[in-house]
Amino acid sequence: MTRDDDFRVRPGRIRPASGPSVDTALRQVRVAVARAGGPSQHGVGKGGARPSTFGRGRAALIRSVHVGGCRSVIVKARVVRRSAGGLAAHIGYLQRDGVTRDGEAGRLFDARSDMIDASSFATRAQDDRHHFRFIVSPEDAAELADLRAYTRDLMADVQRDLGAPLDWVAVDHWNTAHPHIHIILRGRLDDGADLVISRDYISRGFRARAEALAELELGPPSPRERAAALMRDAEAPGWTRLDRALERLADSEGHVDLRPAKGPGDLFGAQALVHRLRALERLGLTDPAGPGRWRLENGLGERLRRIAQETEVAGRLAAAVEARGLVRAPEQWATSALSDVLVGRVLARGQDDELRGTGFAVIDGLDGRVHHITLADAGAPEPRVDAIVRASPPSRGAHPMTVTVSDLGLTSQITARGATWLDRRALDPNPLPEAGGFAGEVAVARQARIDHLVAEGLAERRGVGLRFAPGLLETLKAREVAAVAERVRNETGLVFRPTAEGDAVSGVYRKRLDLASGRFAMIDDGTGFCLVPWRPPLERNLGRSVSGLAGARGEIEWRPPRALGR
């Protein structure tokens, strides 16, 4: 027999027969706006952002929020200016493998169908001035009966609020600890007008709708659930609903008064607010100002978001190091942005910001530290895990520039046929930094590579000295290219035609070959082929005819330049 207080009725998935009623009491409206994160009666508060009066949804912000809603839903939003290629790439990334409950590829759905053609939606949106991206993450998403049905109900409510038919697609993701939905909304209406949505509705009203639907299905959280959620927020490293409440309670100088006679009652839980203030005090973000009173530091939100980001970066570094079985002390973790050129091995890659489509890479550097860098495109194939890369601080834009130095991992280079990065390190008169970590691994691998070259007759030990064969790198490269050319000849039946300085090169660019000696492009002229140094602009011409002139060191001057993106 279970205890009576363990029994709880869940109302299940329900929808109202008609639209939500409008609260007419002024008090209820004020509470609704507060629940949606709106401004208090005392002005704009410390956040500094005044209410928006422009765009659809401003009135709905006040009338549509659910007064009793306590189910938390995180909503992230971004407005993206015209970028047809970027939209198609983003949709493709959202549909990648491993995001569903069963580890399958994501599938687009909309208001009517579970099987949506991504290219059709991208084509419809290609001339739109902008589009909206939303990530909706209900705190209790795993308890919702059907995330897709929940999304359809949410977008139906949003459509009623905005007073116009909406064209949207979505993907549900289950590949993180918190299941969530990605929604892409076109920025153009049926009549050809641009869809403009109030900033307040995007930041508050949308979330209030999502929270109301979660509560409609699951019911209000029990006191135990509510207390547990608030206490999690009280210790969280980032920005939380408790911080939103504190900013609304703060006066113009940042003072928060939680003395019993002045406190907020149980709006967000006075005990949780005090707990949160003490946690912020430990972080140096609040100062005690007397019994039951605190003063919030300026820029609280930005500082909390920075702390959360640093915490997440540290977690990524720790996970990457642990997964590879490496020993790297936390003192060797570089959590700040890249400030100097870095050479190292890619330990891991992942998603940084799903809304923006950015990624991250963890790099084990020659400087003895493990670094975290952001990537402009999480779906880009490079840099590959285990590749040796050179990363430079951003000169333009927000992301470092990465160049792959070697596609081969360190171990594979020891016995590789071609001219490897380890060979270039062996020939480099400048010693490696005595930094331990990856530099120590490189020193061991370099010595093993030298032993291999000695066995191959390409290096000779003389006492404590070492002599490499003249033209070592060119010899190794030529040997590898010849072996690969023979393999391609056997596969295709085409004749291999080596190139020399001044030779004209023309044909169809068939594929890229990643060798120990670098990257090469296969150019097919119909009866024969050549292997020439590859460079990034060539990839735009995959399967197309290209032409150029071979230079002294084997490089190709491609023509016409515009076809190769020069």
Image (cartoon, rainbow, N blue to C red):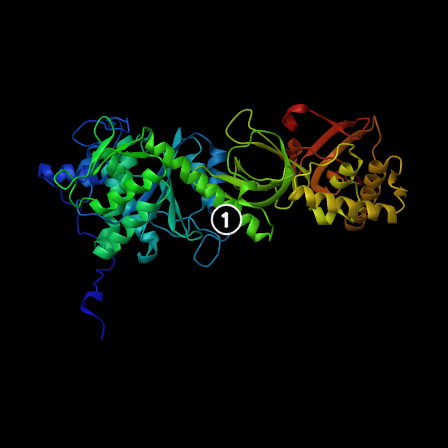
Q: Residue furthest front?
A: 290
Q: How many neighbours does mark 1 have within 10 angstroms: few (below 14), some (14-19), or many (20 or more)?
A: some
Is 484 left or right of 30, judged from the image as shown? right
- In the picture, which quadrant includes the N terminus? bottom left
Q: Nearer the viewer, residue 292 or 344?
A: 292
Residue at 43%, 39% (x, y): give it.
309
Q: Nearer the viewer, residue 241 or 164?
A: 241
Q: Can you give x and y, in whole percent of width and height, for residue 396 in the image?
A: 54, 24
Is 197 left or right of 502, judged from the image as shown? left
- In the picture, which quadrant includes the C terminus? top right
SS under mark 1: loop
Up the image or down, 336 lies above or below 16; here it is above
Q: Residue furthest left?
A: 25
Find disc 1 in the rendering and name its residue. 96
Q: Can you give x and y, in whole percent of width and height, for residue 458 in the image?
A: 88, 43
Q: Residue furthest bottom?
A: 1
Residue 188 seen by the camera: no
Q: Nearer the viewer, residue 201 or 306?
A: 306
Is 204 left or right of 108, judged from the image as shown? left
Q: Amino acid at mark 1?
A: Arg
Q: How many marks?
A: 1
Residue 489 seen by the camera: yes
